[in-house]
Image: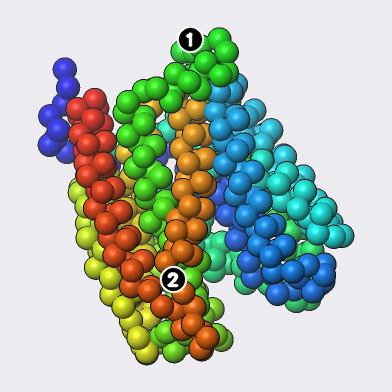
Amino acid sequence: MEKPATQKTPPMPFTGYQKFMIALLAFLQFTIILDFMIMSPLGAIMMPALNITTAQFGTVVSAYAISAALSGFLTAGFADKFDRKKLLLFFYVGFIIGTLLCGIAPNFHFLMFARIFTGLFGGVIGSIVFAIMTDLFPLEQRGRVMGFLQTAFAASQILGLPAGLYLSNQWGWHMPFLMIVGVSTVAGVFIMYYMQPITEHLSLQTDKKALEHLVHTMKVPRYLLAFAATALLSIGGFMMMPFASAFTVNNMGIHQDQLPMIYLITGLCSILIGPLVGKASDAFGKFNTFFFGTLVSIVTVLIYTHLGITPLYLVILVNAVMFVGIFSRMIPSQALMSAIPTPANRGAFMSVSSSLQQLAGGMGSIIAGMIVVQEVSGKISHFDTIGYVMTGIAVVALIMVYFINSFVTKATGIR
């Protein structure tokens, strides 16, 4: 008999092993995100060192995302055929090798190969992490778990990037990649010796062929709705990101040297916000939290994209509130998505979803690049149009998540 949708249950406590796994999965996310993010700030050092152009550097950066998206689709059919621990270890070892290749790259072509190699392995790890999270934690706990996992982004911003830049200034651009290899190797040892096998999904498999498994996953109507919602959320998130720094400096009048302070403070806020939003998702309902986050995001994005010359404290305040909106959408939506697939299809679902995130994010950046124009003075024009487009996307995504939430609530009795 189903529980009423409105029934509230007290928060489920985490076991000792669950706490260990939260810490381990969050750290894995930290290393993957840091490896991806470290490229942009190292550009000023890498381009003259390797004698490459801005176009070549842009190709190197995008090569990771493209290979990661391709890898997600290629591995989706196999994602539920193996012990998730072994699958995670295989791809994480490949990620470490790829990052090591980046750290020893002597020229553009070697670096390009290294980033493609790293993307092929690293791009799949996020989906495996979310599949493991869904296997180990019931829906009543996933909001809190997602809150902790999302702090990896903030931690990479306020801890990883400054450390990486310091190492590159002291010993060259190779050192940040070697640093990531070192800490990732330690994480790999913990996976190997302390993580328990995850094999319950293997007994549920009915598709004998990987391609057949992928096709069956792609045919489920509720999966398609979840994929579409994931893509929309990613497109909206990536539209503003590529031009935010240029807009802050040239339109708001913030000095380039003050940007690290903005990133530092908003990153610290994000570390505090993530777990709180996760708790709110489990306590007040995931859709309710998502609805709140959508309203906050729409208001702050419209304010942000219309700002002119603005004092530093106000820029920091708007950015911090905007991150409240972003996390209040990201965390509950991902917790809801985790309840959509059956255990037998969970790995394939997460792999396809991760690939669509990569592709949609790239599409969002392309669309934004077609809208905005940088004038001779450096000022970014039509940035307000980005705000209007993001608002429209947010409303459509809200409607999609409403239907996803209705399905999850009906199936589980949990809000």
Residue 82 vs 240, above or below: the answer is above
Q: Is residue 147 left or right of residue 1?
A: right
Element at label 2:
loop
Q: Quadrant of residue 210?
A: top right
Question: Where does the image place residue 268, in percent across and percent down from the top left?
Answer: 45, 69
The amino acid at mark 1 is Thr
Question: Where does the image place residue 162, in percent across and percent down from the top left?
Answer: 62, 72
Q: Quadrant of residue 327?
A: bottom left
Residue 368 vs 212, above or below: the answer is below
Question: Where does the image place residue 2, in percent across and percent down from the top left?
Answer: 17, 22
Q: Quadrant of residue 34?
A: bottom right
The amino acid at mark 2 is Val
Residue 173 vs 33, above or below: the answer is below
Which of the two labelled residues, at mark 2 and mark 1, occupies the earlier sequence position? 1
Q: Residues within 10 Å of mark 1 (few under 14, many from 20)?
A: few
Please tell me which residue is depicted at 20% across the width and 49% down the height of the picture. 288
Of residues 130 and 3, the one nearer the viewer is 130
Element at label 1:
loop
Q: Which residue is mark 2?
A: 372
Q: Residues within 10 Å of mark 2 (few under 14, many from 20)?
A: some
Q: Which residue is mark 1?
A: 206
